[in-house]
Image (cartoon, helix red, strand yellow):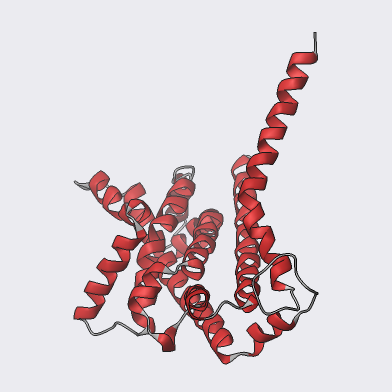
Amino acid sequence: MHFWPRFRAQLAGFHTALVLLFILAPIAIMVPISLTAGTMLTLPVPGWSLQWYEVVFTDPRWTGAFINSLIIGAASTVLATILGTLAAIGLTWGQFPGQRIMLAVISVPLILPIIIMGVACFSFYATMGLVGSRFALVFAHAGLAAPVVVTTVMANLKSFDRTLMRAGASLGASPLLSFRRILVPLVLPGICTGALIAFLISFDEVVIASFITTADQRTLPRQIFSGVRESISPAIAAAAVILILCSALVLALTAEMQRRARKLQMKPR
């Protein structure tokens, strides 16, 4: 009698395992390849070595690309977080015509094919003479990531009790003080979640970077992509593993921020 529910549970678990295997297998293959003692991207590996990680951390091309990715990611994250948070507040609490249309326009980068974004960014920044500069890539990545910040902050603002702001005003707090001491701390999990995802978007992005950066301003994803075309080396796998680990760390921090946000919402007021 209890066979069918147990069988369904086991079947669901089996299907889940197959999906995870399908998703993670290509990623997992990178790990042994990055530890190979050989000089080719092949399996099985002829031996084990950390030499390719040493190459990634000592070769100026790889270290420069990694540092460039961190700088661009941090700058675009700050810009996207500020713009996205302010836009979320205006769209959630503001009362003005065209509000829904504006939200739809802000969400365009989330649904537009990335190749179209790349062409558009190249055309726009080329007319301004910014192609090949960090500023162009920072602005482009900020525009790509800001809608994510808007979404996460708006989700937190919808559960925010606005009477807290009025209570602060009744006690003599200025709008700026209420913003810093009341609003920001309570929606901070949403802001941090959006910022972490924004950094991940910038750190992993390669298409727009391929359009508007030069060889002197390569990011880590573009260096990996260029390495595949120029020279097949296990250093590419080592760099890919580092990129995956950085992405996994950001996702773990994002999950922690979401957990804290849910815990904060469950607290009695």
Report the quarter where the N terminus lies: top right
Residue 151 picture location, percent across and down: 42, 51
Q: Residue at x 71, y 27 (%)?
A: 11
Residue 21 picture location, percent across and down: 67, 46
Instruction: Tell me if residue 256 can be seen.
Output: no
Q: Residue at x 62, y 65 (%)?
A: 244
Q: Residue at x 65, y 52 (%)?
A: 24
Image quadrant of residue 64? bottom right
Report the quarter where the C terminus lies: top right
**87 sits to left or right of 28:** left
In depth, the one of 194 and 109 nearer the eye is 109
Residue 237 picture location, percent across and down: 63, 71
In depth, the one of 20 and 183 nearer the eye is 20
Image quadrant of residue 52? bottom right
- Disc count in the image? 0
**9 sits to left or right of 182:** right
**163 sits to left or right of 48:** left
Residue 110 picture location, percent across and down: 37, 53
Instruction: Tell me if residue 136 can be seen.
Output: yes
